[in-house]
Amino acid sequence: MTNSPTLNTKNVRAIMPVLVMGTFLAYLNQTLMNTALPKIMATFSITAAQGQWLSNGYMLVNGIMVPLTAYLIQRFTTRQLYLWAMSVFAIGTLICGMAPSFFVLITGRMVQAAGAGVIAPLMNVSIMYMYDAHERGTAMGWVGLALNFAPALGPTVSGYLVQTHSWRWLFFLVAPLIIVDILFALKVLRNLTEAEKIPLNWSGVVLSSIGLGAMLLGFSNASSASIASWQVLGLTMLGAIVIGIFVYQQQHTHVRLLNFNVFRYSRFNLSVIITSFLMMALYGGMLLLPLYMQNLRGYGALLSGLAMLPGAIVIAILSPLTGHLYDRYGAKYLSLIGNLILFGGTIMLSRINLHSSFLWITGAQSVRSLGLAFITMPLQTEALNALPMDMIPDGSAMFTTIRQVAGSFGTAVLIGIMSVLQLNATNHLKLHHSLQYAQAHGALQATQNTYWVAAACVVICCLLSFKLKGNDQPLPK
């Protein structure tokens, strides 16, 4: 992959909003379905298990596409790939909005994921080529606004539209925004790299698709099936075995789908490990809160989403600032401060009870978001800054894939732990109390204790952060 001619400041300022908007819409789309599922189930007369495939199918295709991006970014120009990805995303969105059947709706979601899965890794690579090393943190901070604000905003927007309009408006609202972004991209987007005619490792595509697909599906099934079942443990083990074969194959072929030499760089490895534990704490914790609010407290989907909104606003405001701070001070102190704040917010959520105020719940989630603003994008910038420029596409694909797997794994583990704790607590409490009391307080105790597990993941992140270096480390050539 070769560089295109250097862009001037005017070009960069025109391109960045287009890329940030595309990333924002892609990540917003990930969480729009959660609160809309009951309405969709009623429209198509389907079960909850069938409805869950709207999320599972999207996740699987998205997860399969991300490893492919390392090849696609080198095979096509920036302009070609971005316009293709956004066009596919738009077509999938329109299919979903007009879907006459559940099958068509799932098909549309998978088409959406095929386009959206390319956008974030392409965005990361674009920033690395548009900005010098000492400016990338600030640029990544603006991306953090999209990556962190959009998923938190999704449940609020979804809850409002589902309660006041039809679930189809979730797609009719996003589709015009995608089209506007495409039109702006046609006008201002420049090629940051030149395309190279490199062969595609088809066996690697098949192995990574099967391995990641099985593993992600196994993790997602943990919320509805026993951990020891073939739907969870069986698929996870199958995925792990196939991924092992994929790694071996990539190390013994001249045509690689992913370059695993990125793991020779210790700064990249450390950033990936910290991010993995962070995603385990983050995504698992994010799922616990709606379950507590809706199942134990009786809040509706809209209020559950609104509890996330102040935290999303905190991230939106602080992400550009923390990106600038990374450029000045490096990742170490930002990660330490952020993890300490995140730990405090997680402990606050471990103290919730059946009478906790909405203000306390929202405040605790906002504290967690404040901590995340100091960690997520600085760590991603630190990881990619550690690599030579010719490894950036592989590093971006690898980082995004591992982050997604870690988030799914963390969700599966925390939900599995909560299920076991809830069963044990309920069985113990019903010996001395009514069944209704035992079920409510058993679920509450399980939620509280599971947040302590999430807090333990944050402690690990904090300890590992001491090994991070400042921004005075020389970049690889």
Image (spheres, rainbow, N blue to C red):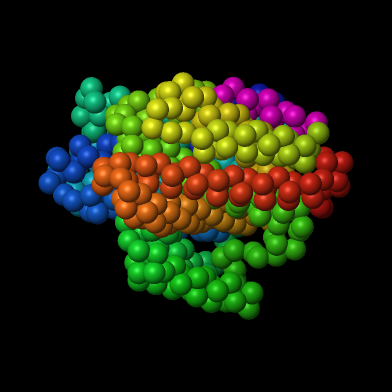
Which residue lies at the image location 56% right of the left edge and 65% below the top edge?
Answer: 257
Which quarter of the figure is the N terminus placed in? Answer: bottom right
Horizontal and vertical percent position of residue 119: 50, 43
Count of numbered badges drawn on the protein: 0
Horizontal and vertical percent position of residue 205: 47, 67
- 205 part of magenta stretch: no
Relative to 459, is 477 on the left or the right? right
Which residue lies at the image location 35% right of the left edge and 71% below the top edge?
Answer: 230
Instruction: In the rendered view, tell whether residue 220 sits above or below residue 251.
Output: above
Relative to 370, is 261 on the left or the right? right
- 324 part of magenta stretch: yes
Q: Nearer the viewer, residue 239 or 90?
A: 239
Q: Nearer the viewer, residue 178 or 385?
A: 385
Horizontal and vertical percent position of residue 137: 71, 35
Instruction: In the rendered view, tell whether residue 343 sits above or below residue 260.
Output: above
Q: Nearer the viewer, residue 248 or 75?
A: 248
Residue 222 visible to the viewer: yes
Relative to 290, is 150 on the left or the right? right
Q: Quadrant of residue 337?
A: top right
Which residue lies at the image location 16% right of the left edge and 49% below the top edge?
Answer: 46
Residue 415 visible to the viewer: no
Which residue lies at the image location 73% right of the left edge and 39% below the top edge?
Answer: 336
Instruction: In the rendered view, tell whether residue 91 sits above or below residue 114.
Output: above
Name the magenta segment's main secondary structure.
helix
Horizontal and vertical percent position of residue 17: 55, 27
Magenta range: 314-328
